[in-house]
Image (cartoon, rainbow, N blue to C red):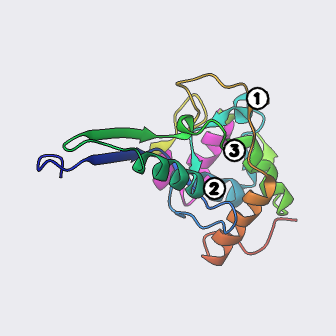
Amino acid sequence: AGVRGLPCIVLRCGLITWHPETGACNPDDVLCRILRCSVELGVSYEADPRSASPMDGLSVRDFAQVAVRYARTPLSAGAALVMSISSEACPDCSRLTAGRIFQGLRQCGFLLEQLSYREWRNRVATNTSAADALLPHLPTEQPPLLLEAVYIPATACVCIPEAEVAAWVAFLREQQRLSPHASN
């Protein structure tokens, strides 16, 4: 379109997570696989202090709002705007932390032993059916999906509410991607 003189906007997305109200998500993305492996094994990596650090991910609702904002940017004929949309593009959006996800899982009735990230990764590597699909996405030394480009202290973040995690869990159960029964 740009070659033909039309204004174009190219939006590249980072991780798009679940819808905060409905829980609808891609049940095969890396974040859902982390959740499913954690539930399957009854473990979390909350003993790692980095689990409280913000992760790079926007809810589908927040991503759509940012995308619409950029789509409304007036452009002259033949102009192009290329944007990468990650959680950094939406400083007022709720932040995702692994710790908050694991707390939300507990609120849904799942029992999770708290491990360091390295212990959690080793347990996943040796004990879960989803390991083959998940391991290529897991760093060896640090938790995945951390916001590394900017430093945002966890205390300065507006974290996702646990009710959003509950909606996500309900959606995954409905899709038969997560056990219908909690572990307690």
| Mark nearer the N terminus (3 vs 1) | 3
SS for callout 2: helix
Q: Quadrant of residue 19?
A: bottom right
Q: Which mark is residue 94?
A: 3
Q: Which mark is residue 37?
A: 2
Q: Amino acid at mark 1?
A: Ala
Region rendered in magenta: 118-135
**Chief SS of the magenta region:** helix
Q: Please state which of residues 129 and 73 is positioned toward the viewer in this rendering.
A: 73
Up-down relation of residue 141 to residue 182 (above or below): above
Q: Which one is in front in this view, the residue at disc 3 or the one at disc 2?
A: 3
Q: Image quadrant for the C terminus?
A: bottom right
The residue wearing badge 1 is 156
x then y, percent, for residue 130: 54, 58
Q: Amino acid at mark 2?
A: Cys
x then y, percent, for residue 105: 78, 56
| Mark nearer the N terminus (1 vs 2) | 2
Q: Is residue 160 left or right of residue 17?
A: right
Tell me what residue is drawn at x 41 percent, y 39 percent: 84
Tell me what residue is drawn at x 73 percent, y 49 percent: 101
